[in-house]
Image (cartoon, grey):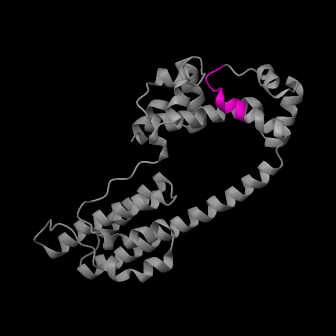
Amino acid sequence: MDEPIYLEYLKEDTLLGKEDPKPKKIQSFAMIPYHSLKDGNIEGVMGCKALIDSVDGDRLSADELMNKKYLFVSSTTMASLFAMQGGMGTEEAQALRNLYIGRMDDCKTIEAVDELHTIMFLDFTRKVQESKEEAEAAALEDQKGRAKISRSIMKAMEFIRANLHTKLLLKDIGIAVSLSPNYLATRFHEETGQTVQDYVRDQRVAVAEVMLKESNFTLTEIAKGLGFGSNSHFIKVFREQKKVTPKQYRLRYYR
């Protein structure tokens, strides 16, 4: 029996993380500030101020100020990529990149561009640091929550994640974990704060998000492979949870 497409897909290397494209002209020593940014290391960034100020690349304009601005755009784009690798949200990083590129237009001197460049670097670094702190806090909360979840409910959650391609009836989940449907439903809600149905829905939508971003599966294949039953049901559920249709989500985030 063939594996469900989403299980087969989740084994692919694509989910292990794709390297973001990096400008070829930036030398390795000049990458040090970007790695400090990705780590949310403000002191490290400040310690690399000389490297930040000396950002270099192809000469794109004979005008010194315009050339500096072109390099600023390249560096800000690079900063946003490293910030996303460090945990900053994609939309937030892109918005901050656009904000600083917009501010660059108002710079009338090379010195003003250099000053904005340092401010941009520090702002991205602080945002990454905040993202990491939030992620750590969420992980601690999740760890506390998991400590309260019984072995049988953990098994039920694992069974659900492994069988998203099926109809996932409450009675079948109960049989898999040796609990009656009513008792399973009550315990699951008490321990996770979600109904079984809501958990199934959230897991399907979460995997659908990844597949829309990272795979070439059609919407029909994703809907069928994740047990939505029909395209219309998939679209309805996905839009309720993500506020956009699967097609709009793929157009926005497909890599």
Q: Is residue 236 above or below residue 214?
A: above
Identify the image quadrant of the N terminus. Answer: top right
Q: Is residue 15 above or below residue 141?
A: above
In the rendered image, residue 165 lying in the magenta stretch gets the answer yes
Q: Position of residue 140 (x, y in %)?
A: 72, 59
Q: Residue at x 37, y 81 (%)?
A: 49
Q: Position of residue 245 (x, y in %)?
A: 50, 31
**In this view, which residue lies farthest toward the left?**
62
User: Front-most of 241 and 108?
Assistant: 241
Q: Is residue 215 above or below residue 111?
A: above
Q: Is residue 46 above or below residue 168?
A: below
User: Front-most of 225 and 29?
Assistant: 29
Q: Total marks drawn? A: 0
Q: Position of residue 92 (x, y in %)?
A: 48, 56
| Drawn side of residue 84 relative to residue 191, left or right | left
User: Front-most of 148 and 178?
Assistant: 178
Asked whether residue 244 appears in the rendered view, the answer is: no
Q: Residue at x 49, y 61 (%)?
A: 86
Asked whether residue 181 appears in the rendered view, the answer is: yes
User: Front-most of 239 and 13?
Assistant: 13
In the rendered image, residue 12 lying in the magenta stretch gets the answer no
| Drawn side of residue 135 relative to residue 41, left or right | right
Identify the image quadrant of the C terminus. Answer: top left
**Location of residue 188 by image quarter:** top right
| Drawn side of residue 239 relative to residue 60, left or right | right
Q: Position of residue 117 (x, y in %)?
A: 34, 74
Q: Which residues make up the magenta segment?
A: 158-166
**In this view, which residue lies farthest toward the front?**
1
Q: Residue at x 56, y 23 (%)?
A: 4
